Image (tube, rainbow, N blue to C red):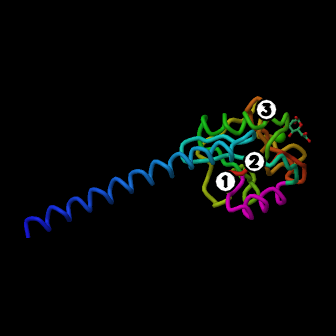
Amino acid sequence: KGDSGLSEINLMKNKVSALEGQLRALQASFTKYQKVATFPGGRIVGNKVFVTSGYEGNFDDLKQRCLQAGGQLASPRNAAENAAVQQIAVLYKKSVFLGITDIQTEGRFKYQNGEAIVYSNWAPGEPNNDKGSENCVEVYTNGKWNDKSCGEKRLIVCEF
Ligand code: 289
Ligand code: CA
C-alpha cells in the first residue's frame, strides 16, 4: 500500500507538470493571438477588446455588423476605455459611432442593453440634438463626444 501510494503521487506530479507545460504554451499562444487581433486597429482595456475593420456605415449597419461578429458597438464605460476608442479614431482619422443612443427618450442616453450611461465625455455644448434629429453618439479624434444623426456614416469599432 505504501509503495503504491508513492507511485500514485509521482503519477499525479507528472500530470501536474505536463498540465503546467500545456498552460504555458496556451498562454504564449493567447498572447500571440491578442497581438494579431489588435494589429493595427485594436486596443485591449482590462477584459475588453476594442477593434475596427475600417468599415464605415450608418448606426444600424454598424450595430448589426458588431452583433454578427459576436460583439457589440463600442460602449466606453470609463476614461481608459474612451481613450482606447479615441486612439482607434486617430489611427483611421475618422469619428466613431458608439453603442449609445437616446432613441427611446430624448436626452436620456443609454447603452444597447437599455442601461443608462455611467460615463460620458461630451464636447462643450453637446449633446444639443441639432435640428431635433441627433440620437446617436460619435467620438471625435480628440476623444470628445457629439450627438449626431444616426443616418450619417462613421467608423465601426466593436467591443468583445
Ligand atoms: O448637422 C449638425 C452636425 O453636423 C453638428 O454640427 C455642429 O458641429 C454642432 O452643432 C453639433 O452639435 C452637430 O451635431
Ligand atoms: Ca450634436
Locate residue 77, reporting x and y percent: 60, 44
The residue singled out by tag 3 in the image is: 90
Q: Mark 1: give few (<14), some (14-19) or many (20+) Cα within 10 Å.
A: some
Judge depth for marks 2 and 1 and give the one in front: 2
Instruction: Give the labeled residue for mark 2.
Output: 157
Q: Does label 2 or label 3 sit earlier along the sequence?
A: 3
Viewer-proximal residue, 128 or 2? 2
Q: Amino acid at mark 3?
A: Val
Q: Quadrant of residue 82?
A: top right
- Classify residue 123 by image quadrant: top right
Question: Label 2 amino acid?
Answer: Val
Q: Amino acid at mark 1?
A: Lys
Which residue is the site of mark 1?
A: 110
Compared across the picture, whether 13 is left or right of 99 comes to: left
Q: Residue 64 colored magenta?
A: yes
Between the residue at mark 1 and the residue at mark 3, the CA separation in whole angstroms equals 25 Å
How far across and down, in percent of the image, does residue 159 sit?
A: 67, 51
Tell me the magenta residue range: 59-73
Q: Outermost residue, bottom direction? A: 1
Circle 1: element type? strand
Tell me which residue sits at (58%, 45%) in the image: 118
